[in-house]
Image (tube, rainbow, N blue to C red):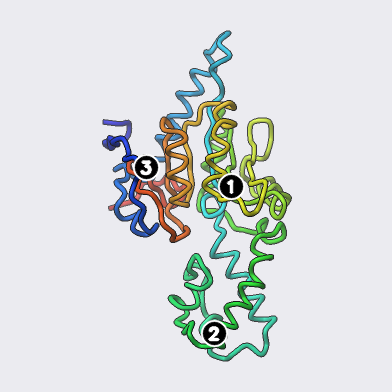
Amino acid sequence: MQRGGFDRIATDRRPREAPRVPAATWVEVCRFQTATQYQTLDLVLHAVERAMERYRHRGADTSIKRPVVVFDLDDTLFKSNQVRTWRIMREWLEDRPKLHWEVRRNLETLRPEALAYHLKDTFSDVAGLDLAAPYVREALADLESYWNPRFFSNAYCQRDPLQHCSVEFAKKVHDLGASIAYLTGRDEERMGKGTRRAINTSGLPRLSSRVKVFLKPHKDDDDAMFKKSVRDTLTAWGPVVATFDNAPANCVVLKDAFPKAISVFVDTVYDPGLVEIRHGLYKIFDFSRRRRST
């Protein structure tokens, strides 16, 4: 029995070739820990406190280092995909006065929370547009070319709103003494300046000697593989006690990279692609630590 009154799921050694399933199926079939959201977040804080006790009483043992908590940014600490895409789509609608009436009608009433992860799915599954229609395909291609340079840009990434209670929780982690690694799939060239500005003006712990951001060096680097590649860097910095990420593929990589850490899946918006099944992660929806009535 763990602190907070919940049982921690024992995870078996994963098979040599773990099955891969669509991300939505992954969320359904993975056996998450039975902890509630507030129990999960409190468990992380307790883990930081215990690690900080060891660090403060390390004496001459320099091998004991300050603990590290890893946070993704997009759709983990910030609300990014839907909100940023919605803003860009509204600008595109304003810039296209001759857009086909059906495309305009079906898109202009959508709210950010209704948008799919991919524009194609927003057109077909959310807006009910027929992708076989030439004017729909033309509009989609035009929006994609309009969306891409804006979505992946300093100007737009620094305007994302914050996930509920993310500032409060990250500040609590920082105040307890942990180092913080913002480990993001954003790339340095297109989004580095905007990302640093967003962090330093959002209320999140500001960048410092124990708060660092790790961005992909190249825009074409795979997000999960990049996050896997910084394992040794993070381990050398300090023991990773917890990781938070909204992308199932990234959660799998982080759980494998830091098997002793508390691996937390933030169930918000994510790529629907195929992911290896992995059991034993924790799941939250935001960073509120309020107990929810059942």
x then y, percent, for residue 257: 47, 35
Q: Position of residue 78 (x, y in %)?
A: 56, 53
Q: CA distance from mark 1 to mark 2?
A: 33 Å
**Secondary structure at numbered mark 1:** strand
> Residue 131's x, y, as percent?
49, 82
Left or right position of 32 against 148: left
Side of 178 where 190 appears, left or right: right
Which of pointers 3 and 1 lies earlier in the amino acid sequence?
Answer: 1
Q: Which label sits on residue 110? A: none
Judged by depth in the image, the label closer to the viewer, 3 or 2, is: 2
Residue 142 seen in this snapshot: yes
Identify residue for label 2. 136
Cα separation between marks 3 and 2: 40 Å
Q: Amino acid at mark 3?
A: Leu
As drawn, the label of residue 281 is: 3
Using residue 184 as the reference point, say whether residue 293 is left or right of it: left
Residue 184's label in the rendered image is 1
How many C-alpha atoms fall within 10 Å of the one at disc 2: few (<14), some, or many (≥20)?
some
The residue nearer to you, when weighing 55 against 70, is 70
Query: Does residue 108 sit above or below 111 in this rendering?
Result: below
Q: CA distance from mark 3 to mark 1?
A: 19 Å
Q: Is residue 33 left or right of residue 225?
A: left
Hey, what amino acid is under mark 2? Val
Asked whether residue 176 appears in the rendered view, the answer is no
